[in-house]
Image (cartoon, coloured by chain):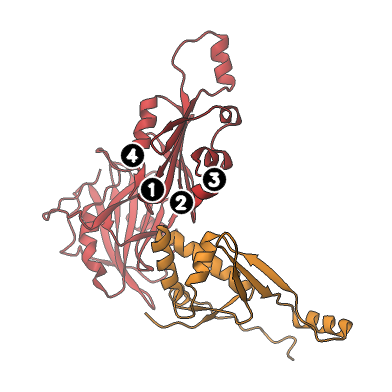
Amino acid sequence: MIEIETTKPHSIRDAKPFAWAGITLMIPAGWETSQLDHGYALLEYQYRPVLELKTATIRGRFSFQRHLNQLTRSGHKRLSPQLELTSWPPEWPKFPAAAEVQTFTWQGAHIGGQGLLVYCHHCHRATLIQFFDHGDRGRDAIPRVLASFKDHDTQPAPTLAVYDIQATLPGRFTLTRFQFDAGRFELVFGHSRETVTLWRWSPADLILERCGKKLARLVLDNGLLPSAVLVEDGRPGDRSMEWQWQPKDYRHRLRTFFGKRTQRPGCALRIWHRPDTNRILAVRAEAIATVNAFDGICTSYGII
Amino acid sequence: MGLFKKKRPVPQLSREEALNCIPVKSASIQAAQTAEGMVRLQYPLVLKPWIAELAQRFRGTQYTPPSRQLELDELGSLTWDLINGKQTVREIVQQFSGQTKVHPKEAEAAVTRFLRELGRRGIIGMAPGRKK
């Protein structure tokens, strides 16, 4: 794990978390998520790109030049200008000796930037981060952002912190599918047979108006529940609804047939309205081991 | 020969330039308010010149293009009200985001898609905006 030593205490007053594809950073509050893909993120500030991140787990031996070339060629923004390797800028925080790091700069026709490639020998992950230089004070934030860099965690940290949502899931879950549409986000995490799906809708007041101010109607319209469960009334809470049910698939029938009395994994859906942020959030867990795990995910899921 | 003349590629606007454009409502649009407080637009159907010519010859009288109606939803009505011929796309996005508490990136996607659709129907045009 890479934990960077920093001599200055990190101010979190004007910072917010960003977590995607296993990389966690603290970024200035004004920076926004612009594009996301598998192992890729582009952040912007006032409609201009400020940070691009590409990450991949390296199989086999790590070759600095080869993987630098691979990562610069991949992703949405391909670096066409020639990279120039540079020495470590004195204002940037030191990375531990266990991490292989190389900094570089590049200059295109309209924009330039600087960045670094980090390879963690512990998690075998190579990460390319580059900061776009618009000739303003954006450079000042770089040391603070780099000081917060983590490529895998031993301490609790959000699994996901993008756009305006953040959530912490048990480490075994990996992101398998995601879709970010204006007004509706959907992210699916999986591990073996366990599946956790997160949703976020916005603006909530308008959506609830169309659903007759009923969260159950939203659940119905979006097909969040299996048809067999739909007939059951959900358990109402404070601006929320919750359903819990047992899957009735072939595994369930086999267990019943053999008279197994072990605790079966269950399914649950919770949907709640956050009027303060005008958002609706929902979590559905399928074949999850315990209700506590589901509760933990719901508690961690919120708006940044 | 004009027929085989190579078409010049239309210059593409950068994102920055597109956000600095000013949407302007077409003069031929009639906007009305519905009982639910939404905006209903009546706009002339834009026909290809040769179809309009053909229609005029068949009718014999002065041809008036058919009109269509478009009823906007809450967010569409809000965006329509923000178009005043002075505000840039960027400013409209910022106001939309502030009023609906929608994430700025979502606001940008929703507003620009809506403006593109209005432009396709000839309801609005884009004036070159001021540089920020």
Q: Position of residue B120 (x, y in %)?
A: 62, 72
Report crowding for label 4: few under 14, some 14 to 19, many 20 or more residues within 10 A (C-alpha): some
Is label 3 in a helix, a strand or a loop? Answer: loop
Determine whether A28 is above or below A214 in the image: below
Q: Is residue A210 left or right of residue A108?
A: right
Tags 1 and 3 both on a single chain: yes
What amino acid is labelled 3 in the image? Cys
Chain letter of the residue beneath label 1 in the structure image: A
Quadrant in which the N terminus of chain A is drawn: top left
Report crowding for label 1: few under 14, some 14 to 19, many 20 or more residues within 10 A (C-alpha): few
**Which residue is the extreme one toward the left?**
A7
Q: CA distance from mark 1 to mark 2?
A: 8 Å
Q: Which mark is residue A275?
A: 1
Q: Which residue is mark 4?
A: A300
Q: Nearer the viewer, residue A153 or A246?
A: A246
In this rendering, the label closer to the viewer, 1 or 4: 1
Q: Which chain is red?
A: A
What amino acid is labelled 4 in the image? Ser
